[in-house]
Image: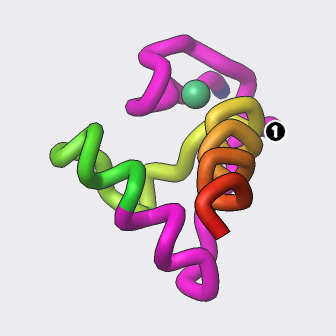
Amino acid sequence: MDFVCSVCNKKLPRDILVIVSHTEEHIVDEIKKKHPKWATDDGICEKCHLYYKEQMGKKI
Ligand SMILES: [Zn+2]
């Protein structure tokens, strides 16, 4: 079963779906700023997760 990553709009296999944990609230906030319709429970793909993690890392 595939899922569509709401962040990059790509259809991807479910096994690379990442549910962003609540301890990563700064990442959640950043994604929601750019994708207001995205909900935490939707999850994102591994690539987007890494991307946002990196973005956050640069700011700290
Ligand atoms: Zn993605």
Query: Residue 33: x and y, percent?
Result: 25, 51
Residue at (29% x, 53% y) in the render:
32
Query: Residue 12: x and y, percent?
Result: 66, 19
Is residue 53 shown in magenta?
Answer: no
Identify the secondary structure beneath mark 1: helix
Query: Residue 47: x and y, percent?
Result: 73, 31
**Image height check: is 19 above or below 60?**
above
Query: Which colour style is shown?
Result: rainbow
Residue at (48% x, 20% y) in the render:
8
Asked if residue 39 lies left or right of residue 26, the reply is left
Amino acid tagged 1: Asp
Q: Residue furthest right?
A: 15
Residue at (69% x, 53% y) in the render:
58
Q: Residue furthest top?
A: 10
Dot 1 alpha-carbon crowd within 10 angstroms: few under 14, some 14 to 19, many 20 or more: few
**Image height check: is 40 above or below 26?**
above
Specify the quarter for ligand 1: top right
Instruction: For the N terminus, give its image quadrant.
Output: top right
The residue wearing badge 1 is: 15
Q: Residue furthest bottom?
A: 23
Q: Which residues are magenta?
A: 2-29
- As rendered, which of 6 and 55 lies closer to the eye? 55
Query: Residue 22: x and y, percent?
Result: 54, 83
Asked if residue 51 lies left or right of residue 26, the reply is right
Residue at (18% x, 44% y) in the render:
37
Asked if residue 8 lies left or right of residue 31, the reply is right
**Image height check: is 21 above or below 59?**
below
Is residue 3 shown in magenta?
Answer: yes
Q: Residue furthest front?
A: 59
